Image (cartoon, helix red, strand yellow):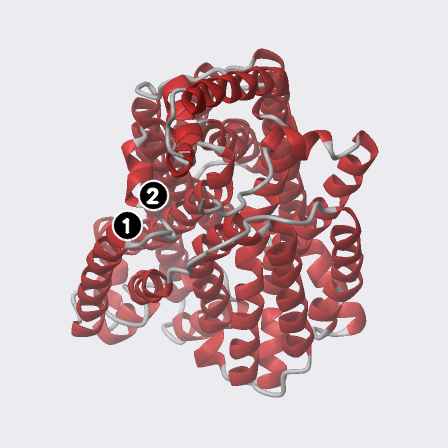
Amino acid sequence: MKQAPATQRDPETLRLSVSPRRRMAILVGVMLGMLLSSLDQTIVGTALPRVIADLGGLQHYAWVATSYLLASTVTVPIWGKLSDMYGRRLFFMLGMAVFMAGSALSGLSQDMTQLILFRGVQGLGAGAMMPLVMAIIGDIFPPEQRAKWQGLIMGVFGFSTIVGPTAGGWITDSWGWRWVFYVNMPVGALALLTAGITLPGGGGKGEQRIDYMGAAALVAGTVPLLLALSWGGTEYSWLSPQIGGMLALALVMSVTFFLVERRAPQPIISPSLFKNDVFAISVLASFLASAGMFGAITYLPLFVQGVIGESAAASGAVLTPMMLGFMISSIGGGQIMARTGRYKKLAISGFAVAAIGTFLLSRMDASATTPLVMRNMVVTGLGMGVMMSLFTVVVQNAFSFDQLGQVTATLQFFRSIGGTIGVAVLGTVMSNRFQSALLETMPTSVASAVPADRLAALQNPQVLLAPQTAAEMQQSFAAMGPQGQALLEQLLHAIRASLSTAITDLFLVSAGAMALAFVVTLFLREIPLRSGRHHTAATLETIEDELADVAMGMAPNDLREIPAERAAAHR
């Protein structure tokens, strides 16, 4: 008789093998890993101006972030699938080690080319951190308990957003920009040691086939898409051959990826996942939530600096209320899910509050005050925080244990794509709306007094943000005589009002994304969160059914398909 390949350990057996004390140690390890990757994204941004001053290469500024984004996004589904096949511990530790190597090399960079390359190495490791953290939580807790712990993990993300910019500025000023990367090493070493000691070993055994063709097609489709979205409207016009070519290549390779995955024995992202309506709706809702959330986060500091007139430091701090609301609702929402075992009403209410918050942001104008902005941001954060951990629990609850890494990583992948598309689309909305609003509000006296070529150069919100640009404008208008100052004030007022209109219109688009997600979530099918007790009962029932099938003479090879089929039937 041919022996069936060994499979992963039964989820209940795995959970029972982990003592409560060990669970807490695992939580500490994965939270350190989560803190490491999320904090890095906010700290590095603060240090970049000093990096440019030291290494030069201003024209490559955006690539420092883009290389990290590309590498982390395209590898998320690959890490998730590999962890399903060979176990979480191996790939979580490998991802963390790659991330730390990239951090050390980034700190040693001697020019911008090296920094961009090593940030890409960091991104390769970061692609493992978020999905595998969530998958590990799914491994050691039943669905009804995952919610509160995954909510806490997302609270770590909110915490890093609050302290990251301040920490990055302090480290850069005190020790130099290279220490922004070196500071990852002790935290990473502690997280790596904790994970190595506490995480359960094992994973998939027997014959495994890595989907190399699918991985290649995924990378070939995602990279040009992200590049087109990052460069469109900035490096190149949206209608340029470069952007059009990258979008066409992304479309062709995405179709190729779909066709490859349909035939792959063990696909990275199985098309069959989307046949599950819970998964499909969760992916769409998370995609829309990320598009709306990251757009708001990206452009709120610009509103605070350019329209209200606060300093750069104050504009960074003004995100704190939003992230505090995010943390409170993320942790609180997880506790509610854990106690009730239900999630649909929570998801609907979260999107409703987020839509109200972004709509309130869209109602602001040039007379807005900092307290008003902070109030609206708190409302927005309270709504957004619920969704970021909720849908991870939802999709994990809808699938069998051996697909947990794949579905978690796929959800994170589409979140990342949604955030990138949201920032790109909203940036285009802001740019186009600013130019049209400025033409409408530009005083006739300014338009007639200033030469057309000089006026075109001044139609930029940068004059509200950069002291050097503002000083050049001051000198330019002073040369016009006594009326120059009055004309300058009129122009600045028009630019400020136009910027306000452009950004608040952008917030209205974000509110539309949240409202659409709200409608989508109304169709979300609710499956009560399973508990360990329920799972044990289901496992015993499956064993009894299999014994009955053996008694009836069913072939042993056929038995391998029974658990998944019956699990689907139970669901």
Residue labelled with disc 2: 506
Label 2 residue SS: helix
The amino acid type, in three-letter code, at marker 2 is Leu
Q: Nearer the viewer, residue 198 or 64?
A: 198
Residue at 37% x, 28% y is 554
Tell me: 186 left or right of 326. right
Residue at 58% x, 23% y is 333
Q: Residues within 10 Å of mark 2 (few under 14, many from 20)?
A: many
Residue 342: % across, % down: 50, 15
When the figure is inspected, residue 348 is found, relative to residue 90, above or below; the finding is above
Residue at 48% x, 15% y is 528
- Confirm or deny contact between disc 1 and disc 2 (CB under 8 A): yes
Residue 222: % across, % down: 33, 61
Q: Residues within 10 Å of mark 1 (few under 14, many from 20)?
A: some
Tell me: 570 left or right of 116. left
Identify the disc placed on residue 145. none
Q: Nearer the viewer, residue 133 or 357?
A: 133
Residue at 21% x, 49% y is 440
Q: Is residue 307 visible?
A: no
Residue 175: % across, % down: 79, 72
Tell me: 484 left or right of 327. left
When the figure is inspected, residue 555 is found, relative to residue 452, above or below; the finding is above
Q: Residue furthest right?
A: 21
Tell me: 415 left or right of 239. right
Residue labelled with disc 1: 429
